[in-house]
Amino acid sequence: MKALSGHTLPFAVLGHPIGHTLSPVMHNAAFQSLGLDALYLAFDVAPEALLTVLASMKTMGFRGVNLTVPLKETAFKGLSDLAPSASRLGAVNTVEFTATGLRGHNTDGKGFLTAVNEAFDFSVTGKTLFVMGCGGAGRAVAITAASEGASRLLLADIDEARCRAVSRDIATLSPSVKVEWAGATAGEWANRTPEADLIIQASPVGMKPEDICPLPPSAFRSGQLAFDLVYNRPVTCFTQAAASGGARTSNGLGMLLHQGAEAFTIWTGKPAAVEVMRDALKKALYG
């Protein structure tokens, strides 16, 4: 890595917890590849401290920040300057420090579409999707899929109000898309998953090795696709259950890559070194 100096530009990812993140791996590899005097760090920040921390980071000279669980919706509610991507998706995963303040963006939707196409050669247009978890990333995935022409969305979350909010937003933005609540319990979800072409796991379940997938192998079927937004394990409890049930699977490493590449360009104005970032992530995860 290039030696740090008084001119080094700082970037970071914030989350709570944050120990699982691989974002510093890919962004620092990209900075080095492009010869940029920059450094990307990770900080554990609780939701109630987020806006204070972001203001302090701007004062300290930070140039850009990524946000992960559970900060995306907090930032959306707290930032006054929102790019169209964040306004549409109702969550912020990328903060740009501008001359006038903080601007919130969302690169999750584009990252999801690119990753799913790359993993499965699959387009959501005309398809039925089951989205398990309707928080910041899940709502971004659901709203993006609707805007790209998905025919039907089945939304699952233990918090019914969260699903209803996503459903209302989709009704406004993409009124032709049929949206259904798939229930709040694992048993209800397992009864609905066979209807889907693609099942998306958008909750934090699977980030810890002891986590148990709420869907059993019998909830999946042959010919189905299963995409887990969790990326810090080569095989998650969700992808393991899905593969046992006959589905084709992918973890979320590709989505991390492509949402990060989009954020990189927002901050620097330069095309991201995508293949360098991909190689760094693969090395970190798979060895």
Image (tube, rainbow, N blue to C red):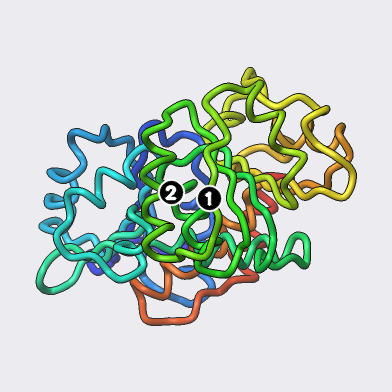
Instruction: Check if mark 1's residue and mark 2's residue have beta carbons within 8 Å.
Output: yes
Q: In this view, does 21 lie to the left or right of 115?
A: left
Across and down, in percent, residue 104 comes to 27, 62
Examine the rendering and report whether any part of residue 287 can be seen: no
Quickly name the residue at label 2: 167
Q: Which residue is drawn at 18% across and 36% down?
A: 49
Total marks drawn?
2
Across and down, in percent, residue 190 comes to 70, 28
Q: In this view, does 97 lie to the left or right of 233?
A: left
Across and down, in percent, residue 19 comes to 46, 34
Q: Is residue 273 left or right of residue 212?
A: left
Compared with 176, 269 (above or below) is: below
Q: Which residue is drawn at 36% across and 39% down?
A: 15
Q: Residue at x 38, y 44 (%)?
A: 42
**Amino acid marked by disc 2:** Ser
Q: In this view, does 50 lie to the left or right of 131?
A: left
User: Which residue is nearer to you in this view: 26 or 116?
Assistant: 116
Quickly name the residue at label 1: 179
Q: Quadrant of the C terminus?
A: top right
**Amino acid marked by disc 1:** Val
